[in-house]
Amino acid sequence: MATATETTPRTTLGKVRPHQTQNESLVFEKSSPGKRAYKMPPLDVPAVDPAALLGDAHRKTPGLLPELSEIEIIRHFTRLSTWNYAIDLGMYPLGSCTMKYNPRVNELVARIEGLAEAHPYRPDSRAQGILEVIALLQKCLIEITGMDTITLQPAAGAHGEFTGILLVRAWHESQGNPRRKILIPDSAHGTNPATAAICGYAVENLKSNAEGGIDLEALTRQVDEETAALMLTNPSTIGVFESQIHKIADILHAKGALLYMDGANMNALVGKARPGDFGVDVMHLNLHKTFSTPHGGGGPGSGPVACKAFLEPFLPIPVLVRNAPSAPGLDSETWESNSPGQLTWDYNRPQSVGRVRAFYGNTGMFIRALAYILANGPDGLRLTTEDAVLNANYIRHGLEDLYELPYKTASMHEVVFSDKRQAALGVKTGDIAKRLID
């Protein structure tokens, strides 16, 4: 007798599961002579001898193809599809700071015809819907980060870093000196020193202390009038939150330097702490790391840059603005494009660092990120942050008796172990990783 579970469609059980056996026969093994999965309608044109049409290209024998019924084909490929890695079937273990969760509602919203087919050359007056999406996402991200303004133009996290440091350089130049160097902690992402160098700065390494954070004494010694900024990932790549972040900001600001924050690990802060409130001057966000958009991978990434008001004049062009009331007496066409309350792009920004991306950024990612933010709301976003930290500490508690934990500081979004104990027995990190994959 079948149980309720066996007779209930899998879609109602909350999660699709892999097929109970992966010993699927080859499609040729399922073949039986004479089976057909289709029936062609009668010809409505005169029959023609294929040999007369194809000449030497005409096959004398039929191709070696399996013969199956339609239902056998459908079931075969459906079972094969359950072998794929997908959000319904398990986690995607690539990058601890990366969400790798792309809800279906995001994809549904991003495929709304008026949004999916919004052309960048469409006049602003005819693109108010997508511009409102961009404006609302900007407002949400400004609130989440505690900053004053933002650009969504950068196409990825490293591109956001590049844009942020361009803002830093432009501001220092406006003060009369672009300065010479940027400080980067030894726990930083590898893109940080590359970004600093490509923007024309010398890179100076900053050693971490025993807790895995910034050594304030070392920072005080190294910050001088030639320091443009400190590029800080907070929480860091080893999962440590800089508990003295206010003091770090004060040390930098006292010397006229800026605090740049790599927002890769904002999934440990959203709804709990805002970088703008603890002294950050400029930062980038990775929408795929915190707001559930697809990962870039050479494709459509997004790395918005948020900053304080004093950096606003240097933002990439164009900047989204809302029209003030227009002067009376304009013709209808001019009135339509300048009507009160309409959103438009402002290109008249003489101090801008210029464009960093064609058009306005990857708008498909904006739609997905906004859908995620609105679907969760403030309470849901806060809970997601708490879950991220809880998960990391759950893993830490379960493994800290087995692996070496280099830093005993409280873990945030991730925990990083060493292979020191295993290496002593001849087991390397690569061996462990391969077994995890297995």
Image (cartoon, grey):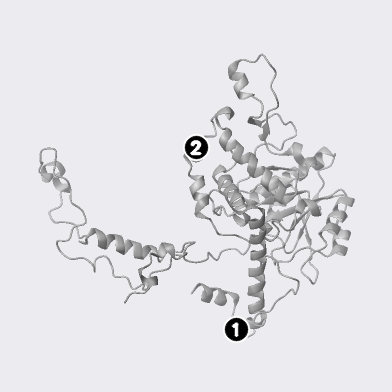
- Mark 2 to mark 1 CA distance (whole Å): 59 Å
Q: Position of residue 257 (x, y in %)?
A: 84, 50
Q: Residues within 10 Å of mark 2 (few under 14, many from 20)?
A: few
Nearest to viewer (mark 2 / mark 1): 2
Q: Residue at x 60, y 75 (%)?
A: 429
Question: Up-down: is 169 above or below 247?
Answer: above
The one of 423 and 336 positioned closer to us in this rendering: 336
Left or right of residue 221, residue 81 in this image: left
Tell me where residue 289 sits by quadrant.
Answer: bottom right
Left or right of residue 120, residue 168 in this image: right
Residue at numbered disc 2? 114
Three-letter amino acid code at the position of disc 1: Gly
The one of 292 and 272 positioned closer to us in this rendering: 272
Mark count: 2
Q: Quadrant of the N terminus?
A: bottom left
Q: Position of residue 261 (x, y in %)?
A: 74, 54
Q: Do callouts 2 and 1 mark residues in contact (Cβ within 8 Å)?
A: no
Q: Residue at x 76, y 36 (%)?
A: 313
Q: Earlier in the sequence, mark 2 or mark 1?
A: 2
Residue at numbered disc 1? 426
Q: Residue at x 68, y 47 (%)?
A: 141
Three-letter amino acid code at the position of disc 2: Gly
Q: Position of residue 406 (x, y in %)?
A: 72, 75
Left or right of residue 51, residue 30 in this image: right
Question: Up-down: is 292 above or below 120?
Answer: below
Q: Position of residue 58 (x, y in %)?
A: 15, 49
Does the rendering let one see residue 307?
A: yes
Tell me where residue 82 sits by quadrant.
Answer: bottom left
Does the rendering let one see residue 152?
A: no
Q: Residue at x 63, y 74 (%)?
A: 395
